[in-house]
Image (cartoon, rainbow, N blue to C red):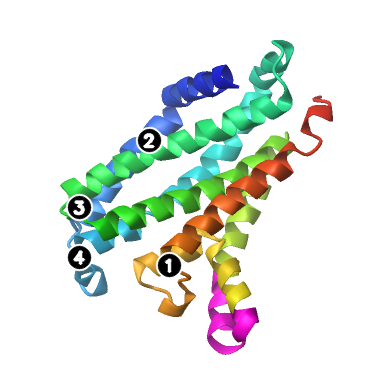
Amino acid sequence: MKNIYISGIYRILKNRIFILGCILAFVITLVFTANLMGMTGRFERMGCAGRMIFINIAMMAFFTIFVPLYTNEEYRDGTIRNKLVAGFSQKQVYLGILFSHITALLGMTVCYFLAGVIGGAKISTELAITTVILFFAMCGYISVMEFVAMRVQKTVLVAICAFVILNLAYNIVMIGNFFLAFILKGTAYAIGRIIYNASVFGQWLIHAGFADPQTNPGNINQLIISVLIVVISILLGCIGLNKRDLK
């Protein structure tokens, strides 16, 4: 699997869409953090660090597009089939691609963080912790995306599935805001809060300061939730994978 992982990273680093994504991540983060657009009101009052955290969600939009389409391209150009012919299992291919995407996320996060610091955000423990938490939340999101992308080989269908996952992540939080505020109590509230934080969008809202503070289960619990999503996605993704016939 190591060879698949390394070759996957190499191809991603050469991918024009990913390169453009990293450039945009740097430029957009710099523009928002430094408030070069001169926006006023609440956006101005956020401060550099607040604006930096605010724009972090843009990576969710990028990987919603990049992960399924890149994996689908691996199917279409025969890369995945060639790896299977070379003796690798579908499980190894799946994990290699997944960890390549997570490494790509790490690279984009570095671009984002550097741009934020250059834009005026002061390096602090709180900013570092928030960046790490949102990174792991995105890892969970990418894991779910890759789980679906590895199973769906048709381009149109995988694009639809990606859109559904994005909307699910958004609507869980929007509906969750109502239920957590007015309906759920006690144990039901605790479960609802876990579901709320299972969405990267939910964790982003919390750290961007747009959510009710009570929806935050704590930094450690958020990390645990994100890691569990990655683990569960991998376990589900590996079920029956080696027995599947590729057309």
Spatial CA span between label 1 and label 2 = 23 Å
The local crowd at label 1, few if under 14, some if 14 to 19, many if 20 or more residues have their Cα within 10 Å, is: many
Q: Marks 2/3: CA distance? A: 18 Å
Residue 90 visible from this viewpoint:
yes
Q: Is residue 239 above or below residue 164?
A: above
Query: From the viewer's perspective, is the residue at label 2 or at label 3 nearer?
Result: 3
Q: Give, as a three-letter code, the residue at label 1.
A: Leu
- Residue carrying label 4: 47
Residue holding disc 2 = 107
Residue type at tag 3: Ile
Q: Rounded to the nearest whole Å, what is the CA distance between mark 3 and mark 1?
A: 21 Å
Within 10 Å of the Cα at label 2, are there few (<14), some (14-19), or many (20+) other Cα atoms? some
Task: Determine the secondary structure under disc 3.
Answer: loop
**Tag 2: amino acid:** Gly
- Residue 110 coordinates in the image, percent (x, y): 32, 40
- Asked if residue 174 is among those painted magenta in the image, a careful observer would answer yes
**Residue annotated with mark 3:** 123
Whether tag 2 and tag 4 are in contact, CB under 8 A, the answer is: no
Boundaries of the magenta span: 173-189
| Mark number, residue 205 | 1
Secondary element at tag 4:
helix
Disc 4 residue type? Answer: Gly
First in residue order: circle 1 vs circle 4: 4
Q: Nearer the viewer, residue 88 or 22?
A: 88
Residue 155 sits in quarter: top right
Single out the residue that lies furthest toward the bottom.
182
Q: Residue at x 57, y 89 (%)?
A: 182
